Image (spheres, grey):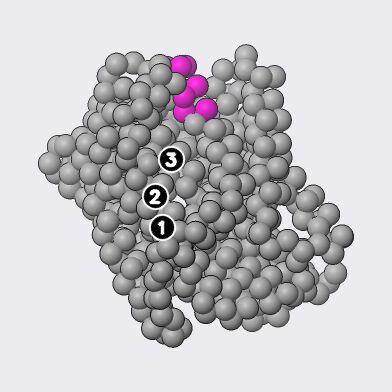
Amino acid sequence: MGQFSIHNNTHHKSLLLLAGPMILSNITVPLLGLVDTAVIGHLGSAHYLAGIALGATVISILFWLAGFLRMSTTGLIAAAFGAEDKQELVQALQKSLMLALAVALLLLLLQKPLGSLMALLADASQPTMEQAFNYFYIRIYSAPAALANLVLLGWMLGVQYGRGPFLLVLLTNVINIALDILFVVGFGWGVKGAALASVIADYCALAFALWLVSRLFAKLQLHWCWSFGARLLQLGALLRLNGDIFLRSLMLQLCFSFMTFYGARLGDVVLAANAVLLNFLLLISFAMDGIAYAAEAKVGQARGAQSVHRIRMWVSISLQWGAVFAVLYAVGFYVFGEQVIRLLTDVPEVNSLAIAYLPWLVLMPLIAMSCFLFDGIFVGLMRAKDMRNTMMLSALVGFFGVFVLTQDWGNHALWAAMTAFMALRGISLAVRYRQLLKADALLNNKTK
């Protein structure tokens, strides 16, 4: 097994060249959340921060539920790239873009019922709900661009063009942050300004992503041979393929949304404090996802080339680097966590409450590392059914089971449940991977 713990430097460099740009650009995603929280958190009242937290959470749930678009695109494209199948590189992109636009249209049509459902589930104060609606009904119009960007980002990852996603995510968040400051601080547009900044940034990113992909088409000598009828017929197969990934994403978002909606029932101050702390969790997830995205592409390429040896190698390398970053984040949160919280908000009661729950976030990188990385590994293997099953177990037992047992702890129960959820996700995926490896079944399933 020594060969899998110490690898040729070329392999490490190859993974980091793909993961590095994604880590750097993904760090700007929670940075955007930090700026949103900071500019709104200094408006003088907790209901502004609680309102944007609620509205942004619902948008995140809807867009993250569509995360199967990026996952399936990366998995399919990585395998086609490994098998050198140029026709599938084009067709998979076309089908995924059609599906993304269909889902976006559905979200736009259902925005009123979704807003009503948000109000029903949150049961928050009237000022908080007013700000949540201000954000939600503007931000929802970025759906077509945001979902198409998921597909285009997944396609670029699949062909191992790490620089493209880096530039795409970086551009999106730099524009968003700049407009946040201009609209909220400069023009005084409040929560509506934060929402409008995100919409404009998403459409700017779409234009840029299409340009990047067109350049890659020329480089790879691909041709956009469009047949709408044929792609429409193939869309059914793509929907069936993505069904398990969608259910997996749904269970994930149920846990995160429960954090926000139950927090809202505990009061605006608790909701606002959790919104501040969730930025730490986003920082962990997006940094770890940089390694996980690289693992998706590398494992998927190895699967397309039918090489179990290379799958095992990339899994091992990914876990090594994930452990390094987990330790760095845990130390960083321990040393600088309180300063970051004070930077995010000057509302005294929100500040003190968030600091009280900070120890949960110091532990989180070490506990959550393996679940993020094995998610990427299983996307590369296209084992969607396994991802669905382990997510359901982790949500029902790890999150909701632990919450029921600890609910007398108040807000600590929410963070205990989230910690157990992350831990069980990593453990169950690791066990399943070992089962597949032992049964020599890593290459047996191309669609699940």
Is there CB contact under 8 Å for labels 2 and 3? no
Nearest-to-viewer mark from 2 and 3: 2
How far is mark 1 from mark 2, CA to CA?
6 Å
Q: Residues within 10 Å of mark 2 (few under 14, many from 20)?
A: few
Which element is circle 3 on?
Answer: helix
Q: What type is the residue that disc 2 sits on?
A: Ala
Secondary element at image label 2? helix
Q: Amino acid at mark 3?
A: Leu
Residue beneath label 3, please?
62
Q: Position of residue 225 (x, y in %)?
A: 40, 76
Does the stretch in magenta take in 262?
yes
The residue indicated by pointer 2 is 102
Magenta stretch: dominant SS? helix
Q: Earlier in the sequence, mark 3 or mark 1?
A: 3
Q: Which mark is residue 98?
A: 1
The verdict on residue 272 being magenta is no
Highlighted magenta segment, given as a residue range? 258-268
- From the image, state whether disc 3 or disc 1 is nearer to you: 1
Label 3: few (<14), some (14–19) or many (≥20) C-alpha neighbours in 10 Å: many
What percent of the width, then of the height, locates residue 239?
54, 51
Q: In the displayed structure, does residue 427 sit left or right of residue 114?
A: right
The reply to whether discs 1 and 2 touch (Cβ–Cβ < 8 Å) is yes
Q: CA distance from mark 3 to mark 1?
A: 18 Å
Q: Amino acid at mark 1?
A: Met
The quarter of the picture where the C terminus appears is bottom right
Task: Say whether residue 37 is left or right of residue 313.
Answer: left
